Amino acid sequence: MAKLSAIRECFEGAIPATMATASDAGVPNIAYLSHVQFVDGDHVALSYQFFNKTRQNLMANPRATLMLTHPVTMTQYRLSLQYLHTETAGPLFESMKAKLAGIASHTGMSGVFRLLGSDVCKVLQIQQVPGESLIAPPPERNLLAALRIASERIAACCDLERLLSETLSCLDQQFGIHHAMVLMADQPGARLYTVASLGYEKSGVGSEIPFGHGVIGVAARERTPIRIGHMNAEYSYSRAARESAEHSDWASALELEIPLPGLCKPRSQLAVPILAAQSLLGVLYVESPQDLRFSYDDEDALVSLTAQIGMAIYILQGVADTGEEAQAGASDPSLPDGAPLEIRHFPENDSVFLGDDYLIKGVAGSIFWTLLRDYADKKRTEFTNRELRLDSRICLPDISDNLEARLILLGKRLIERNAPIRIEKTGRGRFGLRVRRPIRLLEE
């Protein structure tokens, strides 16, 4: 008997499955099934879209036979199933809903393929149907070897910025994935913000996406991988996050937008939540212009990779917060020069503008404004993670809302905007504020 986990490629939807059911009276019915999902080594889930004859039979007589075809070798497998229950919400349902939407978009049936439920079935028996099969070509890459190399490189990282850089580099070099981004979770705001990206003309650092929005947001909300193998308009994500200060005429007239990076028409997408100690830290998102680029094996490999990334972030966060205290009143060796730069802060959403140029908002904006106030009032240029975490002016949500990621985001945004201010790491849990032009702070 073949193992269910060994024939997962049959569940990709490239060749529709056929399903045989029978009524209470024994009248048989055979029909195509839009989508069958591999759940684990003993269970599959069937897409329930409308109450047709197949569905009626399954509810009346919870036994069925499923015929699957391997999309490469054309080997056929016959599965004996027993219906257990139907799920209408949760990770399994959302994963199937996303895949079905991709299949529907690919076949021009978006208006018809609407998932109503996921019918979970126990696999009682698997039989390979006799017949000739084609020889499967060797895989393009060894994912286990790629995972080993990536794990070794990640384990050697001593800070979050290096970890993010190594993660994207490994995706490119070891996994052959050339478009990716890492987003961190902002739990109080129920959204994610981009801290690093690969393969895009603009990094999109600082761009945001709400939980539940598109492939990335659904993966975050449900804490489950979401993988789609075809172009899918329904699960596309917005590439611009807009927000304006509601109570300020000046702020509302400006553009508070950082475009989310991404391919214009991705044909394969995979979003994997980054978890540690039962907490959501972020999402790793990869995409490709190629149909069916990411398989079950790719999903397994990236789930394993993000598990290590999650624990590394969790550990590095603790390390970064135990750095030595900076000396109060330390001075910047270089004196600011040039015309004063007006920096505006809007308390409504902690948005910060360099002149008329939007920089950042939210917690990162609050951090930046606090640093600037200490620089202007106390001439301070050296700081520690620990003191920022305890600073009541910033109001960090909790220890799981990674401070190091906020500082990386802020530093990258300053570089991208070619600002005369820099955030420079000066040691474990320590950083410096480098101001190259005189500044004038305006609270709006």
Image (tube, rainbow, N blue to C red):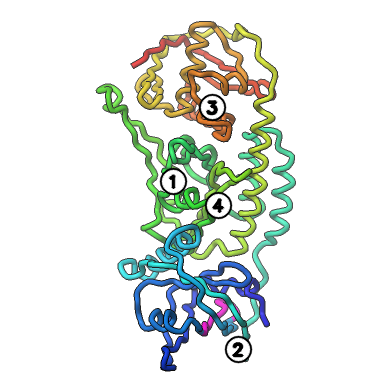
Q: CA distance from mark 2 to mark 3?
A: 59 Å
| Residue 245: percent from left, percent from top | 31, 27
Instruction: Answer above or below: position of 313 versus 352.
Output: below
As helix, strand or loop, the secondary structure at mark 4 comes to strand
| Residue 160: percent from left, percent from top | 63, 35
Give the labeled residue for mark 1: 211
Q: Residues within 10 Å of mark 2 (few under 14, many from 20)?
A: few
- The quadrant of the rendering that contains the C terminus is top left
Give the labeled residue for mark 2: 129
Front residue of 154/63: it is 63
Tell me which amino acid carries mark 1. Phe
Tell me which amino acid carries mark 3. Gly
Give the labeled residue for mark 4: 272
As helix, strand or loop, the secondary structure at mark 2 comes to loop
Front residue of 257/403: it is 403
Q: CA distance from mark 4 to mark 3?
A: 26 Å
Give the labeled residue for mark 3: 411
As helix, strand or loop, the secondary structure at mark 3 comes to helix
Magenta-drawn stretch contains 69: yes
Range of magenta residues: 65-73
